[in-house]
Image (tube, rainbow, N blue to C red):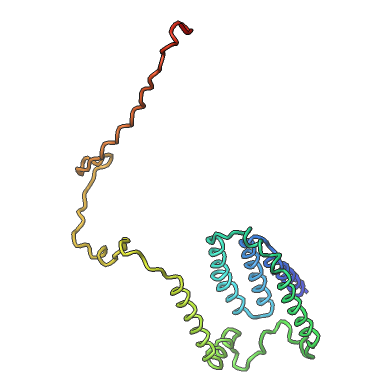
Amino acid sequence: MIATLAFYVFAFILIASAVMVVTSRNPVHSVLYLILAFMNAAALFLIAGAEFLAMILAIVYVGAVAVLFLFVVMMLDIDFAQLRAGFQRYLPFGAIIGGILFLELLFVFGSWQFAEDAGSLRLNAMPAAADGVTNTEAIGRILYTDYIFLFQGSGLILLVAMIGAIVLTLREKAPNSRRQNIAVQVARAEAVPLENVPARTGLGVLGIKRRPLPEAAKPKAVAHDDHGHHGGGHH
């Protein structure tokens, strides 16, 4: 009873947060709702017995991907007025695409049938193995044995995408720009002397003198023309 009630609570919050991700006008709020959706999905995985997937969803997606999205959205200078300017122009095309997706969903749900033994598989993420392997160990065996080539292929695709993003955003610096040479800084060709400076003493002990502050420019005197104003009137 408690597991069923928790499932419906987490599922309701997950659906509501997913809707808010799409409908929220502020992209920062959308990312925050996305983090909430990830956490509730992780809770659903825990209820289903897939603790490994729940931890991956919480650590990788919430701790890395969603936070990265949040930083990118906050760092970009997005002009919301410009984004809303083309809404009316692209509304018919977007409505057509949305209608096609809605029809596809109707076809999927129309041909979907529940399995006969689906009710008995609740709260059992995997059948109990004879050798007593855990859920995490079973996923590792399948991932790194049966699907090892697909796993390595997806890793190579992500690597190529990362290198491509770096190459596209790389800009050559000006020839006269200053660059940091870490090797020279670490080597330190000339030793830096250490001085024991007594407490409450100024820089004069080390022979360092401050430059005198420039004198403030004096305001110019304004000459008053009193010609023709003697005696409080004209003569």
Q: Indicate whether 121 appears above or below 62.
A: below
Return the x and y of residue 83 as percentages of the image width and height.
63, 62
Residue at x 48%, y 74% (from the top left corner): 165
Q: In this view, does 70 lie to the left or right of 175?
A: right
Return the x and y of residue 74 as percentages of the image width and height.
55, 60
Q: Indicate whether 101 appears above or below 198.
A: below
Residue at x 19%, y 58% (from the top left corner): 191
Q: Indicate whether 187 appears above or below 161.
A: above
Residue at x 74%, y 75% (from the top left corner): 96
Return the x and y of residue 190 as percentages of the image width and height.
18, 59
Tell me the quarter of the picture where residue 63 sits: bottom right
Tell me the quarter of the picture where residue 77 sits: bottom right
Tell me the quarter of the picture where residue 91 sits: bottom right
Q: Indicate whether 165 appears above or below 220.
A: below
Residue farthest right in this picture = 110
Q: How many labels does the image show?
A: 0
Return the x and y of residue 34 as percentages of the image width and height.
64, 68
- 135 or 29, which is in the foreground? 29
| Image quadrant in which the N terminus is located | bottom right
Q: Is residue 18 left or right of residue 74?
A: right
Q: Is residue 28 left or right of residue 155?
A: right
Residue farthest front in this picture = 235
- 116 or 104, which is in the foreground? 104
| Image quadrant in which the C terminus is located | top left
- 169 or 28, which is in the foreground? 169
